[in-house]
Amino acid sequence: MFNTLRRAKKSFVDCCVYYLGITLIGIFKRIPHSWLHRLGKALGTLVFYTISDYKKTALTNLALAFPDKSFKERQSIAKHSIQHVMITVLELLAVEGLIGHLNDLISIATAEARPRGFSSDEVLTQKELQDTFSKLNENKGVILFCGHQANWELPFLYITRDYPGLAFAKPIKNARLNKKIFSLREIFKGKIVAPKQGINSALHALQQGHVIGIVGDQALLISSYTYPLFGHEAFTTTSPALLAYKTGKPVIAVSICRNTNGYTIVPSKKLYADKSLPIKDATTSLMNKLMGFLEKGIAHQPQQWMWMHKRWKRKLSPGLKKKYAYSHILVIVNSRDLEYFEQFLSDLARLYSGAALTLALYNPTKEKIFATNLPQYTIQEFSYLETLYTLPNSFPAVFDLAELPVCLHKHFKKTGSVVLYTRKALEKNLSQPTAPLITALKKFSKNAELLKKFF
């Protein structure tokens, strides 16, 4: 009975979502492109100020990538980034109204145009671009690799007007709406497949001389490959390099920029996997080149990249609940209490093995601090509380064991921290006063096994 009601409720909700989506698609495809931009910008502003998770993720990511920028600068980039994402969402819904104007909307900047942010020897020349199109006419495939910049959907639509292509995309849960969204992406000669079937489908498509489109700049924790994106290791797919190695086809990295009149696409030189190397070495080398090109494009127009994705996720213990899977943690301790909290700090490092841990030691007397056995932490000393206001806040979670004033708690929450745990709150959660402090975090684990080692 209950299962029947649950299924009926799900069907009703799915039906409502589907018809709402279809209605919005019907409305937006009739709206002029300039109006879509205004509406997307307004919607992005609303999301920035009302959905704190997106805002905080963007802010902490930006603190990692651009620690030298002021908080005001990072906040502005975060806001504009979410606005650009919302514009892209509306453009996808309105794609039926845009496809007739792709030539007006999209321009390709070759080396002769000297695109900003890149050196001329990194970018395809006009002759090389024409040669690429000629090779596609001869059914000699190519792999395109881009990131979530500006509108990452349009380049695939642009090239599949003339050439058959295949791209990877995760399906949305509403099956009927997913079918409609996929049909918009496949409106020309393109085909969308789920990532699980991606590699085999792509190998087959490349053998037929098709174009493969991969948006591959998001975190992929199952990958063994990391790229030092803005100086911090980021787990990344190797799919484009793997396909290049297996097929001998070239990969072109694509940077996309939204401007007043439409979009500018900057294509990299054709890059090949070195088949004289072992596959792991060859794919790593090629991915480094591809990601380096994307990184330059992001650095040039950071406000057009999707910062609200948790790009620098770390591989943590699978026993942690998703809600508490913090990849970057700040712990603040008064230096005089360091010995008292040393066991908790050691336990926390074991619980969050794999995370980036920073220990901020408050040392107002500037006394010499004896070396501690906490190699898992990056240790920073400060003598004035005001110093914490200048610390780039890349920490979703903060543990305040120094009993900081409330104004600093508000500062961390404002600048990106999702949660702040105080010494008082941790001690209150202990089952008994003599219990190890780490046991106050028992709700962090999916089961009791994860914390048994601390008893």
Image: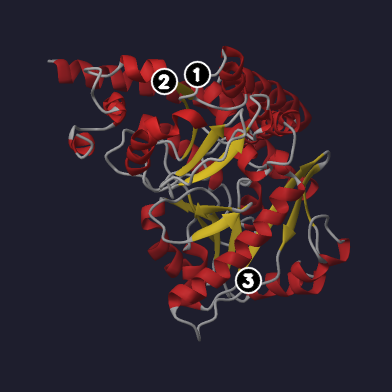
From what the image shows, is residue 432 above or below residue 281? above
> Label 2 is placed on what type of residue?
Arg
Residue that numbered label 2 is attached to: 423
- Residue placed furthest toward the left: 1
From what the image shows, is residue 334 above or below residue 225? above
Residue that numbered label 3 is attached to: 136
> Label 3 is placed on what type of residue?
Leu
Quadrant showing the C terminus: top left
**Crowd tier of the residue under label 2, counting other residues whose Cα lies within 10 Å: few below 14, some 14–19, many 20 or above:** some
Q: CA distance from mark 3 to mark 2?
A: 63 Å
Counting from the top left corner in percent of width and height, residue 233 is at: 53, 54
**What residue is at 63 percent from the left and 24 percent from the top?**
385
Say which label, 3 or 2, has the lower sequence index.
3
- Classify residue 345 by image quadrant: top left
- Residue placed furthest toward the right: 113
Counting from the top left corner in percent of width and height, residue 349 is at: 37, 42
User: Is residue 270 visible in this depiction of the protein?
Assistant: yes
Say which label, 3 or 1, has the lower sequence index.
3
Asked if the residue under mark 1 is in contact with the one under mark 3, i.e. CB atoms within 8 Å, the reply is no
**What residue is at 63 percent from the left and 71 percent from the top?**
136
Asked if the residue under mark 1 is in contact with the one under mark 2, i.e. CB atoms within 8 Å, the reply is yes
**What residue is at 44 percent from the left and 69 percent from the top?**
203
> Label 1 is placed on what type of residue?
Glu
- Relative placement, left or right, of 452 versus 226 is left
Residue that numbered label 1 is attached to: 403
Of the pair 145 and 349, the residue shown nearer to us: 349
* Mark 3 or 2: the one toward you: 2
